Amino acid sequence: MENFFKFKEHNTNTKTEITAGVTTFMTMAYIIFVNPDILSAAGMDFGAVMTATIIAAGVTTILMGLLTNYPFALASGMGLNAFFAFVVAAQYGWQAALGAVFISGIVFLILAVTGLVSHFDAAVPSSLKHAVAAGIGLFIAYIGLQNAGIIVGYEATQVTLGDLTAPGPLLALIGLLIISILMARKVRGAILLGILLTTVVSFIMGIQPVPTGLGDIFGPPASLAPILFQFDLRATFAIPIFVIFSFVFVDVFDTMGTLLGTGARAGFLDDKGRLPKVNKAMLADAVGTMGGAIIGTSTVTTYIESTAGISEGGRTGFTSIVVGILFFLTLFLAPLAGLVPPEATAPALVIVGVLMMGSVMKVNFDDFTEALPAFLTIIFMPLAYSIADGIAFGFIAFPLVKVVSGKFDQVHWLLYFLAAISLLHFFGPI
């Protein structure tokens, strides 16, 4: 094992790798509860989605470790799961949405295998990439506040503040306080621990029934039957092409950004700032996305939380193997998931939104030609309730303001094509 993962070459050992794997798992395990909560809003079976989420994360993370020998972990991506449930599935059905995820995985696979992903990455300016991340963060936080009942519909102003004294919103606020304190104290696994502690508070408040035995916490995994092989490619053809493109776009740049960020933290980048074996890493991501769609979950992507394990000394794929094994062990916590109320997972969405919004600081707002496209991308995601629409506005605005200001050299030729596709998204057939 030590020879296979080259421990000596990477100046690590079994104990360090196991510690790193446990750390990474703790920081991202919240997805086990949050993803089923989001996708069940689209009509999917909660227990089945939980099982699919765990299996997809476990298999893909182990695949990443074996293919690349990098300590990266993967799971259903935040933001894309919200886009899946609240935008695509809400309009076209979750079976069609799974088909869209599967097709996006195929496209991602082609981009990874051919190496075209690097050209695609070079075409989109960094300001738009950061704006997409920030916009998704704002979108996720908005959904979390809605799920908690903290923000509710109101005819006169579209939205307003809910009744904060009601049990649900009050529990969500308590959960937000708990996770915030844990995050501020830099507690490992703060989001997961916060969800569990908020669930305990829900028992005290009488919102959820108190478990009476181990059978209420441990048990066999829920069946995949309700969602396995349920993606409907024929129904997917009714979805606008740009919506499917949005799945690809967000996955590509989320993955590229995460791989480069975590790779830099681990010291894997070469002297030109490139990550060796990046195509293999992207391949694992693409396979995970396609496999996830087949078993019934949204887009699988590399997690930035991998840096937690890297910070603990994880340097090889054995860290990923440990993460994958830990995911599989949680298959036997299916009954526990049924005890977690949505008000306990809603604060997690808000906190993830906070973390993703940090990308906005990397946008140069002193340059109006950078600021306007970024702002439009960010603001339209939550207001239009669509990641795709936010991306489209950014693609249109960026070349437009650059051209009128005479900065032709700052616009990649491919971006004009993406702007044309975006215009067709709003005014044409796609």
Image (cartoon, rainbow, N blue to C red):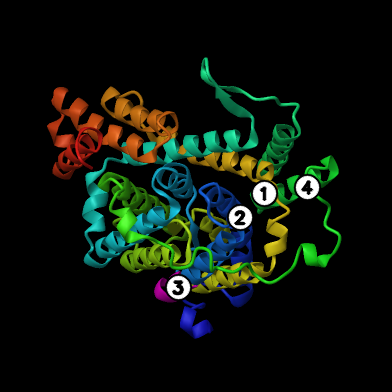
Assign a secondary structure to mark 1. helix
Marks 1/4: CA distance? 22 Å
Closest to the camera, between mark 4 and mark 2, is 4
Q: Residue at x 64, y 40 (%)?
A: 347
What predominant SS class does the magenta segment belong to?
Answer: helix
Q: Amino acid at mark 4?
A: Gln
Q: Earlier in the sequence, mark 3 or mark 4?
A: 3
Marks 3/4: CA distance? 38 Å
Q: Earlier in the sequence, mark 4 or mark 2?
A: 2
Q: Earlier in the sequence, mark 1 or mark 4?
A: 1
Are discs 1 and 2 less than 8 Å apart at CB? yes
Query: Tag on residue 27?
Result: 2
Q: Amino acid at mark 1?
A: Ala
Outermost residue toward the top in this view: 156
Task: Point out residue 88 in the picture as x, y percentages from the top left corner.
Answer: 40, 46
Marks 1/3: CA distance? 27 Å
Q: Residue 65 lies in magenta, yes or no?
A: yes
Query: Tag on residue 208?
Result: 4
- Looking at the rendered image, the quarter that the C terminus falls into is top left
Marks 2/3: CA distance? 20 Å
Q: Is residue 203 left or right of residue 329?
A: right
Marks 4/2: CA distance? 25 Å
Identify residue for label 3: 63
Task: Point out residue 86 in the picture as x, y percentages from the top left corner.
Answer: 47, 42
Q: Amino acid at mark 3?
A: Leu
